[in-house]
Image (cartoon, rainbow, N blue to C red):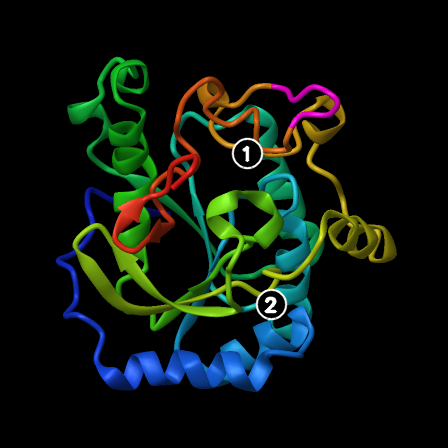
Amino acid sequence: MLKLAESSPNRAAPDTALTEKVEMLNARYRHHSATAVMQGALQDAGQIALVSSFGAESVVLLHMAAVIDPMVPVLFVDTELLFTETLVYQQEVSERLGLRNVQIVKAADIAAKDPYGALRFSDTDACCALRKTAPLQAALDGFDGWITGRKRFQAGSRAALDFFEVETTETGSTGRIKINPLAHWAPQDVRAYMDENRLPRHPLVAKGYPSIGCAPCTSPVAAGEDPRAGRWRDQTKEECGIHIVNGQFIRTGA
């Protein structure tokens, strides 16, 4: 298990070569399948990790990775506020798919900075940064890029999502590439892939949780609501902070 306190210093701003590489990869794989994008990323983008929440739809990318290379590094951030069902699901899916390089990432400074677990009540952004963003950025140090499960349909801030992008944080580029193999998938594509491959569902999906994060900040979604309506309900928060656009945290209407 990786136990990390905070991310390492930011890398230098991306040079022209990195931007050109991302543009080249997007042009090369523009009309390719999600599986081809993932395989191409593992072959052409350097040392790559798959970051997975083991949430409602995570099993799709995990299955693709297992088929291509079961030794692909899979980083799972345990915020210590996750549903018990998610922790059990992570173990079951990893074993069933034969994933042999799952690394559990935890922040080492939670006890010092949030000893009573109350930070989420006063500052959800700070809570996400402490428990998720900082330890993940530290775990990604040394990787050239990482694979995410983001899709265009999930939020307005993701509507123009490409397969490949230069990763940025609030303070600039990390020098890494983010790969989004499922960027163009619709909800029915996800369901079809899971059905065709007989993949196990997260147990909370059947209980009305189409998008699953930390237990205190995730609620069931009613019929007709946006699938992510249960994440940070009644707040202007749309992302945990792992995903940044133009150096800013993404919020509704941004």
- Amino acid type at circle 2 is Pro
- Amino acid type at circle 1 is Leu
**Residue 57 drawn at (x, y percent):** 65, 45
Q: How would you rate the neighbour count of disc 1 (Cα within 10 Å): few for under 14, some for 14-19, many for 20 or more?
A: some
Question: Is residue 3 in view from this perspective?
Answer: no
Left of 38 or right of it: where is 105? left
**Residue 169 drawn at (x, y percent):** 25, 54
Determine whether 211 is above or below 138 in the image: above
Q: Quadrant of residue 14?
A: bottom left
Q: Quadrant of residue 23?
A: bottom left
Instruction: Tally the numbered discs.
Output: 2
- Distance from disc 1 to disc 2, alpha carbons, whole Å, reads 20 Å
Quarter of the image for the C terminus: give it: top left
Residue at x 58% of width, y 44% of height: 154
Determine whether 44 is above or below 81 in the image: below
Q: Which labelled disc corresponds to residue 70?
A: 2
Left of 128 or right of it: where is 12? left
| Towards the viewer: 232 or 68 | 232
Residue at x 59% of width, y 75% of height: 37
Q: Quadrant of residue 54?
A: top right
- The secondary element bearing badge 1 is classed as helix
| Towards the viewer: 137 or 4 | 137
Left of 189 or right of it: where is 159? left
Give the main secondary structure, helix, strand or loop, of the magenta stretch.
loop
Magenta segment, which residues? 220-225
Q: Which residue is mark 1?
A: 87
